[in-house]
Amino acid sequence: MVSAFARFADRAAPGEPLTIRLATQWAMRRPALPVTIASRLGAIRGFARYCASLDPRTQIPPTHLTRAVARRRVAHIFTQAQVRLILRRTQGLEAWRTNLRPQTYRTFISLLECTGLRPCEARRLRDEDFDPATQTLRIRGVKCSPARTIPLHPSTVRALKSYQQTRQARFPFTHQFFVGPFGRPLQSCAAAWTFRRLVRGIPSNGARPRPRLYDFRHTFATRQIARWARQQVPLAHHLTLLSRYLGHKYFRHTYWYVQQERFALRAASDRFRRYRDLA
């Protein structure tokens, strides 16, 4: 982004210092949402601070030049039929030399679906994070999220233990839980590329053109909230537990997982909003 601004500045004002006007012209050169324009100016702001140490004529764009409102795009909510289809498709993945790829992705995706973990949290798991004796999984801190320990269903423990034993037999030199080719850690780009193949033909019910791995997290939270809403349980207490379980540092972050008029969440959304305002 900074390099794009530099090319623009070389054409629009060669040899001139960085100014607020120049930064604004670049940020608004094409129609965009206010949040996108604010993001562009934010990138230039850091660059401007550096330039100011070299050229006193530099102007640093102030914050809140635009009224940017953070709006997350609606996530895809997986159906049980779609999850079963994706897991069946993992069996058709081309195997690595060790024939571990189908089992890796089947276990990896199943873990995301039943726990709501962030994909990066699952990819960073190590053997010592999994404790089959206590049926728990330790999640390391990431993305401003505190470290936490979550309980596992016995069926999840059995699946993780089976995969772990197979992986240890083929790659005894690594303690990374999920691995890619040659026992190296499973990479984000490889997981995303493989998942695009697995969801091919599955229509998205969210704002993006295709489902993502991260949508399993949204699906998990949405189903939990919908179930509690239908059961008329003490929602505020359960939402607090869900916020801690998901690793949200701030309670308001859990609000993104409540969407009105979807999966019986209208009542839950109203109750959650009242509780959030009081929290």
Image: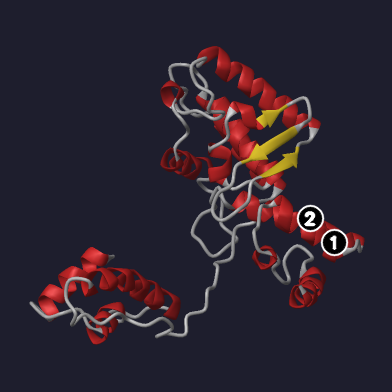
Q: Give the side of residue 3 with respect to residue 148, left or right.
A: left
The one nearer the camera, 261 or 143, is 143
Residue 241 numbered mark, or none: 2
Is residue 95 positioned above or below 8 on the image?
above
Q: Residue tagged by mark 1?
A: 237
Residue at 71%, 28% in the rendered image: 131
The one nearer the camera, 61 or 4, is 61
Q: Residues within 10 Å of mark 1 (few under 14, many from 20)?
A: few
Q: Residue furthest left?
A: 15
Element class at badge 1 = helix
Residue 229 seen from this side: no
Q: Which quarter of the rendering shows the C terminus? A: bottom right
Q: Which quarter of the figure has residue 61?
A: bottom left
Residue 109 horizontal/vertical position (percent): 60, 38
Q: Residues within 10 Å of mark 2 (few under 14, many from 20)?
A: few
**Labels 2 & 1 near each other (Cβ < 8 A):** yes
Residue 38 seen from this side: yes
Q: Give the side of residue 55 with respect to residue 247, left or right.
A: left
Residue at 73%, 32% in the rendered image: 156
Residue at 32%, 73% in the rendered image: 45
Q: CA distance from mark 2 to mark 1?
A: 7 Å
Q: Which quarter of the rendering shows the N terminus? A: bottom left
Residue 71 horizontal/vertical position (percent): 54, 73
Counting every numbered tag in the picture gives: 2
Element class at badge 2 = helix
Residue 65 numbered mark, or none: none
